[in-house]
Image: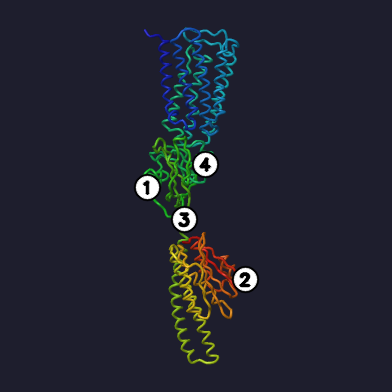
Amino acid sequence: MVSVTAVVGVAYLLTGVGLLVLLREPIRRPDKPGSTGFALAVLGISLWPLSQGVNYFVTGFAPSMGLWTLRLSAASIISVGWFLVAAEVTGRLSLSRTVAATAVAYVLIELLLVVTNGTHGLVFGPATTVRGTVPVVAYGPWFWVQTAVNYGLIVVGTGLLVVEWSRSSGLRRRQTAVLSVAVLPPVVANLATLFGPVPTVHDLTPFGLVGSGLLLSWALYRAEFLDIVPVARQVAMAEMQDAVVTLDDEDRVVDCNRAARTQFDIPRSYAGDPVDRYLPSLAGVSAPDGGTTAADSAGPVADDGPPAGDGQPDTDGPPTGDGLSTTAGDGAATAARSSGSAVVSEAVDGETHSFSVTVSPVVEGGRTVARVVVLRDITPIKRRERELEEREAELDLLRQILSRVLRHNIRNKLTTIRGNADLIAESATGDDAARVDRIVEASDELIGLSEKARTIEDLVDRTDETATYDLRVVAERVVERVRDRYPDATYTVDGAEACTVETGSGVESAVECLVENAVEHNDAAEPSVRVTVARGADGAEIRVSDDGPGISEHERSVIRRREETPLSHSSGIGLWIVSWVADRCGADLLFDVDEDGSTVSLRFPDAR
C-alpha cells in the first residue's frame, strides 16, 4: 500500500516539473523586459517543490538539511525574480550588471551562511531535527532576516504593480491586477506553514506556488502580457495629444489612451470590445506590411482633416505615430516603422473630423500579434487645404482673364493705335509730329509689356519643365533679336564658344530681358552692351554688362525683398522675369554696379 508520505512527495515532484513549463517563454524571448526576472522566479518556484519532493524519499539529517537549504535559496530566488519582474514591467528598473551582481551576492551570502552554520548557528539552531524525512527546523536569526528581506522585495515589487494598476485602464489594468495578486497564494501558504494555523508537518508553500503559476500563465499567454502593451507606456505617452488605440489580430480594442477615450467616447470597460463599436473606420485596418491598408479598409476615407481625438492613455504607452519605430514589450516584439498614413473620417461631438491614421505592427516571431494605431486630428489642416484650393482656383481664373482676355484685347487695340499713328506720322509736321512720336513710343512700350506678360504666363504654365541650353547660342540669338529693335547700340558676345547647362525653362527669356534692359535704360551717347559666357569647374555663368547708369539700388532692393508696394515698386517687369527664372533654375542672380556701368550675372550650378 502506497504511503501518504510517498503520495505527497510525488505531488511535490509533479508540481515542480510542471512549473518548469513556464520557462519556455523567457527562454524563447530573453530580451523581453521582465524575462530575466520571470525566469528566476520560475526556477525558484520549481526548485522549491522539487527539493521538497526529493526530501520525502531520502533519509538522514545531512541530506534533508541540504534539500532544506535549496528551498531556502529558492525562496530568495523567487523574491529577487519577482522584484525584477515588477521593476522592469513598470519601467522603474532595468537589469544592469550592478543589479545582477547584487542579486547573485545576496543568494551566495545566504548559501555561505548555511554552509558555515555549524560555527555560528545563524540560519538554524541545534534543536533542528528530522521527523521521518521532513526537517523540523529551529529557525535562527538569519532565517528571519532573510525572510524579512524576501518579503520586503515582494512587497516593494507588488507595490510597483499596484501603482501601475492604479494608473492603467483596460487590459493593462487587468494584467497588472493579476500580477499583483499572483503572489498571494504562496504567501498565504508560506505563512500558514511558518506560523501553524493549519496543523500539518508538510510545507504548503509549493501548492500555493501552483496558484501563482496559473495566474502568471494567464497574464503571459492568455493576455499576451507585454507582447501587446509596451512597457512603461504611461511615461512615453504622458505628453501625447493624439489618439492611440491598440488592436489585437481580431480587431478587438486591447488598449487606448485617455485622449482616444475622451474624443471618441470610449468607456473604461473597452478591453475586448470590437473596434468598430467606437471607431468604424478602423475595422480591418492593417499595418503597411499586413496586406490591408487604412485607405483600403479603414472605412470612409475623408479628404479633410483629422478625427477628433487626442491620444493620451492612462497608462500611456509609446505609439508609433508618424512612422516611429518603438519597442513594444521586448526585443522580439516591435512596432515596425509604418510606410505611410491614410486619412479617415470619424464623428466627434456630432461633427465630422478628419484624422491622419498611422498603423504600426507589433510583430513577434514573424507574426503580427497587434497593431498600434495613431490618429492625428488634421481637420484644421484639411480645412486650410480646401481654402487654398479654392483660392488657387480663383487666382487661376483671374490669371486667365488678365492674361488671355485683357492682354489679348489690349494688344489688339494697341496694335490698331500704333498702326494709325504711323499713318498720321506720314503727314504730320511740327508739334503734331512730336505728339505722334510720343503716341508711337507709348504704344511700343505697352506692347512690350504685353509681350512680357505673355512670357510670365508661359513661365507659370511650364513650372516643372527643364531644358538644355548652350549659353553661347542663347547669347547670340538674343543679341540678334534686340539689335533689330535697338540698332543704335553696339553689341558684343564673347567668352566660351560652347557652354551647355541643363536647367529650368525660361533662360533665354531672362537673358533677353537683361540685354533689352541694358539698352533701353542706357543714356550713353553711344550705348554698348557686352554679353559674356564663362564656364568653370563649379558651373556656368552668363554676364550682361553695359556702360549706362546701371540698375538703381531701389530696383535691386525691390527684387531682393520680393515685394511690390504702392510706395516701392520696380519700373518694369523684366527684372522680375529674370528673378523668377533664376529661382526656378537654382541660379544665382548677381548685381555689380559702379560709376563705369553695371553687370548682371546669372550663375548656373550645372555645366558641361
Looking at the image, do the residues carrying marks 4 and 1 touch, with CB atoms under 8 Å apart? Answer: no
User: Residue at the location (50% across, 12% down)?
Assistant: 66
Q: CA distance from mark 3 to mark 4?
A: 26 Å
Q: Secondary structure at mark 1?
A: helix
Which amino acid is tagged 4?
Answer: Met
Q: Secondary structure at mark 3?
A: helix
Which badge, 2 or 3, is on the more N-terminal residue? 3
Q: Secondary structure at mark 4?
A: loop
Q: Residues within 10 Å of mark 4 (few under 14, many from 20)?
A: many
- In depth, the one of 389 and 65 nearer the eye is 65
Eye-nearest disc, 2 or 1: 2
Q: CA distance from mark 2 to mark 3?
A: 51 Å
Location of mark 3 (residue): 382
- Residue 237, numbered label: 4
Q: CA distance from mark 1 to mark 3?
A: 21 Å
Location of mark 1 (residue): 297
